[in-house]
Image (tube, rainbow, N blue to C red):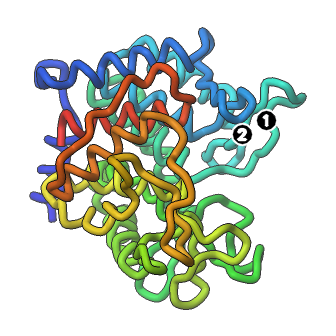
C-alpha cells in the first residue's frame, strides 16, 4: 500500500521544476479564474448563486493556486477563508457566506467536501512553500476524521455535513454524496496520515460507487441513501447532476493509471458534452451549463479510449463550470 501512495504523490504533487510543457493551458486557466472570481480580499465569488462564497469555492481556489504555483493568490484566498469561515468550534468551516446578508455567514453548518479541499490545498501549499500550511491542513483533516466519518457495517462513509443528513435528521438517512469523496484529496491525506481513516474511506467510496449504478444509465445519483441497500435519496431528484458530475473527474485525478474506474461514465456524453441524466429513465435532461464541462468530457473520452473533443475557451463560463474546466485541464496535463 505504501508504494501505491508514493506513486500517487509523484503524480499529484508537482514541483515548479517538474511542470510539464503541456501545463500551459492549465496555468493560463488558473490565472484567468483568479482574475475573474477572486476578490482583492481573497473571496472566491460564485456568480451563478448570487455572488455568495462557500467553503467549496475557497478550497478550489486555494488548490488551483497551489498547483499552479501562485503563492500570492493562495495566501490571499487562505487568509480570507481562515479569518471568515472558521467560526465553528469543531475546526470545520462554515459553508456559506453572503455579501448581501448580515451577518454574512448565513449557514454555520459545514460542507465536508469544502473542508477536504481546504485541507488538501494547505498540504499542497506546505509541500511547495513550507511554513505552517501543512500543519493547518492536518488540523482540518483531523477534524474531518473525528467528526465526519461514520461506519456502515465494516465500511467507512463520509457525512456531507455535521447536521441534516443523518438517520436522526431524515427518514431516508444516512444520506451521502459521492462527489464529497474528493478521491485525490483522500489519497493525499492517506499518504500524509497513514493512521487516519482515509484508506478505508477510499475503499468505502469505491465500493459505494459500484453499488450505486442506478437505472438504465447505470450512474450514481447526486444524493444516495445508505439506510439499507444504496438507493437514490427520497428528497432530491434521482439524477446524475451537478454534484455527481465531479465523480469521474476525481476518479481520473486520483487513479491516473486505472482508466477502468471511469468505465460507464461515457453514458453521460452527448457529442462530447456531459449531460444531466434522469436515472429513472436513463434519458438526458439537459447539457451541463458551461463550456468547462466539455473539457471534463475530454477526460472521460480519453479514459474510454474515444476520440476526445477539445475543450473551448472558459472565459464566458460561470464559477462552477470554470473550475471544473480548470481541474479537467490539470488532469489532462498531468495524469
| Residue found 57% across the figure and 90% down from its top | 228
Q: Is residue 215 above or below residue 301?
A: below
> Image quadrant of residue 234?
bottom right
Q: Residue 255 versus residue 49: which sits nearer the camera?
A: 49
Residue 37 in the image: state x and y as whole percent. Answer: 56, 20
Q: Is residue 166 visible?
A: yes
Identify the mark at residue 272; answer none if there is no mark. Answer: none
The answer to which of 178 and 105 lies nearer the viewer is: 178
Q: Position of residue 144 (x, y in %)?
A: 52, 55
Asked if 154 appears above or below 244 in the picture, the reply is: below
Residue ID for mark 2: 96
Q: State the residue at coordinates (49%, 44%).
A: 139
In this rendering, is residue 253 above or below 159? above
Q: Are marks 2 and 1 in contact (CB under 8 Å)?
A: yes
The residue positioned farthest toward the front in the image shown: 271
* Disc 2 element: strand
Q: Position of residue 316 (x, y in %)?
A: 51, 22
> Which residue is disc 1 drawn over?
105
Q: Is residue 53 left or right of residue 269?
A: right
Q: Residues within 10 Å of mark 1 (few under 14, many from 20)?
A: many
In 3D space, how far apart are the residues under numbered discs 2 and 1 (Cα atoms)? 6 Å
Quarter containing the N terminus: bottom left
Residue at point 18% right, 37% down? 334
Percent across and percent down for residue 154 are: 41, 86
183 left or right, relative to 317: left
Q: Is residue 122 in view from this perspective?
A: no
Amino acid at each position: 500500500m505504501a508504494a501505491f501512495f508514493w506513486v500517487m504523490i509523484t503524480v499529484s504533487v508537482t514541483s515548479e521544476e517538474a511542470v510539464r510543457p503541456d501545463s500551459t493551458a492549465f496555468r493560463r486557466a488558473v490565472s484567468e479564474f483568479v482574475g475573474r472570481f477572486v476578490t482583492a480580499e481573497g473571496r472566491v465569488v460564485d456568480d451563478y448563486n448570487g455572488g455568495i462564497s462557500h467553503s467549496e469555492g475557497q478550497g478550489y481556489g486555494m488548490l488551483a493556486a497551489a498547483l499552479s504555483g501562485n503563492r500570492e493568490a493562495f495566501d490571499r484566498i487562505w487568509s480570507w477563508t481562515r479569518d471568515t469561515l472558521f467560526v465553528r468550534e469543531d475546526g470545520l468551516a462554515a459553508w456559506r457566506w453572503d455579501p448581501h446578508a448580515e451577518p454574512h455567514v448565513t449557514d454555520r453548518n459545514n460542507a465536508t467536501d469544502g473542508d477536504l479541499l481546504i485541507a488538501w490545498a494547505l498540504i499542497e501549499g506546505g509541500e511547495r512553500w513550507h511554513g505552517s500550511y501543512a500543519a493547518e491542513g492536518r488540523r482540518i483533516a483531523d477534524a474531518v476524521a473525528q467528526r465526519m466519518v461514520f461506519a456502515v457495517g465494516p465500511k467507512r462513509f463520509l457525512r456531507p455535513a455535521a447536521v441534516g443528513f443523518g438517520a436522526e435528521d431524515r427518514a431516508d438517512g444516512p444520506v451521502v454524496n459521492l462527489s464529497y469523496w474528493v478521491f485525490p484529496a483522500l489519497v493525499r491525506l492517506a499518504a500524509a496520515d497513514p493512521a487516519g481513516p482515509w484508506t478505508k474511506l477510499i475503499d468505502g467510496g469505491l465500493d459505494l460507487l459500484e453499488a450505486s449504478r442506478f437505472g438504465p444509465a447505470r450512474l450514481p445519483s447526486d444524493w444516495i441513501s445508505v439506510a439499507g441497500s444504496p438507493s437514490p435519496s427520497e428528497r432530491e431528484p434521482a439524477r446524475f447532476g451537478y454534484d455527481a458530475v465531479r465523480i469521474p473527474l476525481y476518479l481520473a485525478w486520483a487513479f491516473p493509471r486505472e482508466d477502468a474506474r471511469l468505465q460507464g461514465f461515457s453514458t453521460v456524453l452527448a457529442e462530447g458534452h456531459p449531460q444531466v441524466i434522469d436515472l429513472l429513465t436513463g434519458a438526458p435532461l439537459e447539457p451541463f451549463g458551461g463550456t468547462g464541462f466539455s473539457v471534463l468530457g475530454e477526460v472521460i473520452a480519453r479514459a474510454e479510449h474515444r476520440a476526445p473533443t477539445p475543450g473551448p475557451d472558459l472565459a464566458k463560463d460561470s464559477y462552477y463550470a470554470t473550475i471544473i474546466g480548470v481541474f479537467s485541464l490539470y488532469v489532462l496535463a498531468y495524469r
